[in-house]
Image: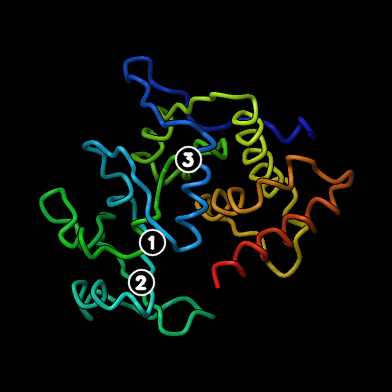
Amino acid sequence: MALHYIQRDHPPMNPTDPAIPAGNFSTWLRDMRTALSGRGGMNVDCGDCRGCCVSSYYVKVRAYETEALKRIGEEHLEAGPPGDPGSRLMGYHPDGRCRMLVDGNCSIYTDRPETCRSYDCRVFAAAGMNAGADKPVINARVARWRFDYEQECDRQEHRAVTAVANFLRQHPVRFGHGRVPSRPAEIAVLAVKAYEVFLDPPASDRDIAAAIVARVAEFDSERD
């Protein structure tokens, strides 16, 4: 594996804050890939953290999520992203809070969108990055997650996810037509989708980039 792609830049953990067990890495990875494929949600030990609910995230709500759309209400919905007809976006309050957050808790939790069900800030710890300078609450949580590794293959898979995320950030010019997003969450998700590329990476950066594009396309086609 190309070791120069293995690096970490998430914020150091405050020594007064205890680490939070993130679970076995490979088990988490498979659960996350299942969630990203639309076949389940993630079980996250959020505790009293509401980082994802107060960090100015737009929430995508798909056309088939009729109960979520009904509970959110038309007044809180905007047009969805281009290329995804029928989906909508739910915005947030000026202070960054989700419009469905009431008294510190989700008011539509049982009918929350798939985007919320699959969101897991451990993805940033997996990718060796933080959620962005404008996401301090999430970053504080990310810094505390600690995966465990029962076998060497667990560590290898973690290194592979981190390597893909680093490659995407270091070589955006290798990906034409804007196929590498700039938002940390999207980069981390792509790393989860394409981690297998760095289990046995091609020799050249050009071939690595092509392999990442192909693997992400294959993953997304399996969802469709």
Within 10 Å of the Cα at label 3, are there few (<14), some (14-19), or many (20+) other Cα atoms? Answer: some
Q: Residue at x 42, y 78 (%)?
A: 80
Can you name the residue that lies furthest to the top here? 15
Query: From mark 1 to mark 2, how far is it between C-alphas?
Result: 7 Å
Q: Is residue 191 above or below residue 113?
A: above
Which circle's residue, 3 or 2, is located before the other in the chain? 3
**Residue ID for mark 2:** 61
Can you name the residue that lies furthest to the bottom here? 85
Query: Disc 3 residue type?
Result: Trp
CB under 8 Å between callouts 1 and 2? Answer: yes
Q: x%, y% of residue 189?
A: 54, 52
**Residue ID for mark 1:** 115
SS class, disc 1: helix
- In which quadrant of the rendered view does residue 6 lie? top right
Relative side of 95 to 119, left or right: left
- In which quadrant of the rendered view does residue 98 lie? bottom left
Q: Quadrant of the N terminus?
A: top right
Q: Nearer the viewer, mark 3 or mark 1?
A: 3
Q: Residue at x 60, y 59 (%)?
A: 181
Q: x%, y% of residue 116?
A: 34, 58
SS class, disc 3: helix
Q: Residue at x 48, y 45 (%)?
A: 132
Which circle's residue, 3 or 1, is located before the other in the chain? 3
